[in-house]
Image (cartoon, rainbow, N blue to C red):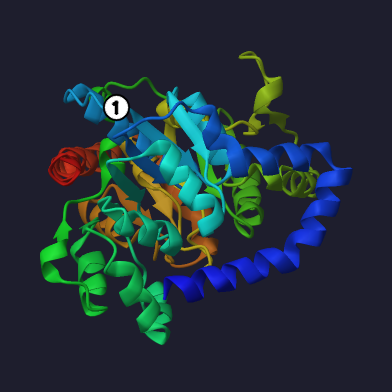
Amino acid sequence: MSFIYHTIIGFFILVASPAIALRAIFSSNFRSVFLKRIFGYKTLKTMNGCIWVHAASVGEVRLGKVLISALKEKGEARPIVLSTFTSAGFDQAKKEGVEHIFRMPPDFVLWINPLLKHLCPSMLVLIEAEMWPGLICECNRRKIPVLLANGRITQKSVDRYRLFSFVFKWIEKNISFFSMRTKKDADRVLGLGVDPEKVRVNGNIKFDVLISGEDISPLEKQESSWVVFGSTRPGDEGVVMEAIIKLSQEHPRLKFVIAPRHLERLCEVKELMVTYGIEFQLHSERLGSGNSRLVLLDRLGELNKYYAKACLAFVGGGFNPRFGGQNIIEPASFGLPVVFGKHMNNFEEEARLLVESGGGIQLNSPEELHGVFNQLLADQEERQRLGKKALETVVKNRGAVNKTIELITRLAN
């Protein structure tokens, strides 16, 4: 199966190589990024016996950073390396201060084998859903344990794997252990035929990310005038803009922040703001003294600073089933009531826990957004009560990091 997989990948790389070569010749930026992706690991010194953590993008990098910090606090002496796939993830890792980082090359044996030879890891930790067949297979061949940490799998992925069950069986037999976020995630991988001895429910590391959230009480926070619309996706901003126009008239003191999930959409969102005739200011242009009532967040890693001083938050991605929601734990960690859409298939358990506690409000349709916000903004006492419930939910569900570290320690020895 490994031979077939790498033959297929090699064929596609061969077909794409003329286009890649031409772009590399005429674009110095593309050439630089491409070379860093293929050979970036060579900037690291050889690390015999290191622990290798792989995270795809920004969200997974944050979880990886939490694991790395916790491992070091527990006395882990071996070097810990973090790889990312996206440029945004790499930039986030640098911003988080991760010591050893590199960009992951494509999952092809001619690049994976030299990488493994250079790192000589004692273990590979894959964050959430990063199943790289070629890499996993090569690790198994070299007797390197592979842990899927904070594992998640949607029903859509399950249906897809069932169509190609032989591929999933080949992948899963090379994974040493599945540490899943929820019982539903665990049941899904068990339903695909994974050995129950290799599966455990250890909770969601996202609840452990913002440890500082424990020190923030919604009852002690000063009255805030900030409202955050975080991690918005296509289709969210129009509804948000309409709500902002009405809320600005009903609550003149309010200030708003819109934070698109992907920064490459900034131009699109700016054009939409101009269409709505709303005056706004980029976060990067405020310099801490901006007077605009609407801020467009154009920098990575700044969203939590706005959550920390806000009174209410909406998290995007839940109005469209194609997106499946975004991280609702972050604003809840700061004691905020969290409003989100009904399509939260990527965050099913988090949505359920917050709704059941009262700290989260799930909307059935975008048209409900303004009414819910207006009601909460008019009742500070109720808003603080729900924010307290949200924070209590986060604190109650922490502990996944320590359970994951126990697995890493056991498997890596």
Give the position of the C terminus as an image quadrant. top left
Please say if 401 is above or below 351: above
For label 1, the residue is: 69
Q: Position of residue 39 (x, y in %)?
A: 60, 39
Q: Secondary structure at mark 1?
A: helix
Q: Residue at x 54, y 33 (%)?
A: 42
| Depth check, front residue: 359 or 90 | 90
Q: Residue at x 44, y 37 (%)?
A: 118
Q: Residue at x 45, y 58 (%)?
A: 325
Give the position of the N terminus as an image quadrant. bottom left
| Depth check, front residue: 161 or 230 | 161
Q: Position of residue 156 (x, y in %)?
A: 42, 75
Q: Position of residue 60 (x, y in %)?
A: 41, 44
* Residue 278 can be seen in this image: no
Q: Position of residue 262 (x, y in %)?
A: 61, 46
Left or right: 82 in relation to 38: left
Q: Residue furthest right?
A: 26
Total numbered labels? 1
Picture quadrant where residue 409 is located: top left
Picture quadrant where residue 88 is located: top right
Please say if 66 is above or below 229: above
Q: Residue furthest bottom?
A: 163
| Depth check, front residue: 346 or 112 | 112
Q: Residue at x 16, y 57 (%)?
A: 201
Q: Amino acid at mark 1?
A: Ser
* Residue 55 can be seen in this image: yes
Mark 1 neighbour class, 10 Å CA radius: few under 14, some 14 to 19, many 20 or more: few
